[in-house]
Image (tube, rainbow, N blue to C red):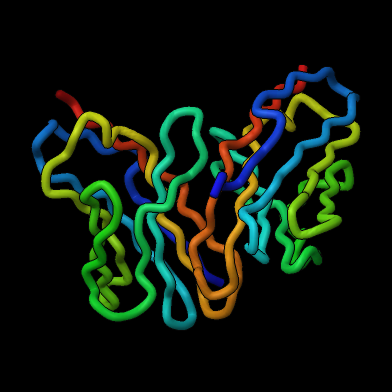
Amino acid sequence: DAGVIQSPRHEVTEMGQEVTLRCKPISGHDYLFWYRQTMMRGLELLIYFNNNVPIDDSGMPEDRFSAKMPNASFSTLKIQPSEPRDSAVYFCASSLLGAHEQYFGPGTRLTVT
Amino acid sequence: AQSVAQPEDQVNVAEGNPLTVKCTYSVSGNPYLFWYVQYPNRGLQFLLKYITGDNLVKGSYGFEAEFNKSQTSFHLKKPSALVSDSALYFCAVRDVGNTPLVFGKGTRLSVIA
């Protein structure tokens, strides 16, 4: 299995621009998680889905952030408009009901200038 | 609500010496406990987990962890450290059901040759 796939690996954009991060979970996994990692705040859970349905988005920092999962093999995290404080590494992870552990993608390093 | 504490930001150990990375947890029920490792510019990688059974859990790369219910601890250990073990280590806990993992802030392990 290829594992969790994220794209792009690096994104540099200017403040005010729209940013879309993409994730392909491991085939067959029914949970998908989006995390953000910064030096100051560590690893933060933003939102998670079960069977493509958002379960808890209480970690989404503000309305500029949105996430979708149109099917079992694809999810997006969108930031519109982006701000410099959104600069972080964004991880996607997936898991299988009953398996307990989550498997992480390589992350997308976002820099907003 | 569940929580995890990693009391040490940094652990330094000489190559060949035993290493311990500490973790304590708080949950309302029986805990599911995990250790992950993150190498530079990579995603989190699953090391081992405790769900039930034997209190000593063995994982990848020679790591093991001991579940101690009375001390609510789940310390990560390795008998002989390698320079290549240098990385960021995260402890995580889940309460009952399929709630998301709650991660600690991470401990940076530095193994010195």
Q: Nearer the viewer, residue B22 or A18?
A: A18
B27 to A78, vertically: above or below = below
- Is residue B59 or residue B19 the one in the foreground? B59
Q: How many marks?
A: 0
Residue A3 image offset from top left, x and y in percent? 56, 47
Residue at 61 percent of width and 51 percent of height: A93
Relative to B109, residue A11 above or below: above
Q: Nearer the viewer, residue A3 or B102?
A: A3
| Quadrant in which the C terminus of chain B appears | top left
Q: Going 79% across and 44% down the picture, which residue do you hit?
A: A77
Q: Is residue B7 left or right of residue A80?
A: left
* Residue A32 rendering spot, x and y as whole percentages: 67, 58
**Position in image of residue A6 (x %, y %):** 67, 38
For the residue pair A85 and B57, the one nearer the viewer reads as B57
- Residue pictured at 24% horizontal, 52% vertical: B63
What residue lies at 23% left-to-right and 65% top-to-bottom?
A: B66
Relative to A75, is B102 above or below?
below
- Specify whether A82 is left or right of A35: right
Q: Is residue A24 left or right of residue B90?
A: right
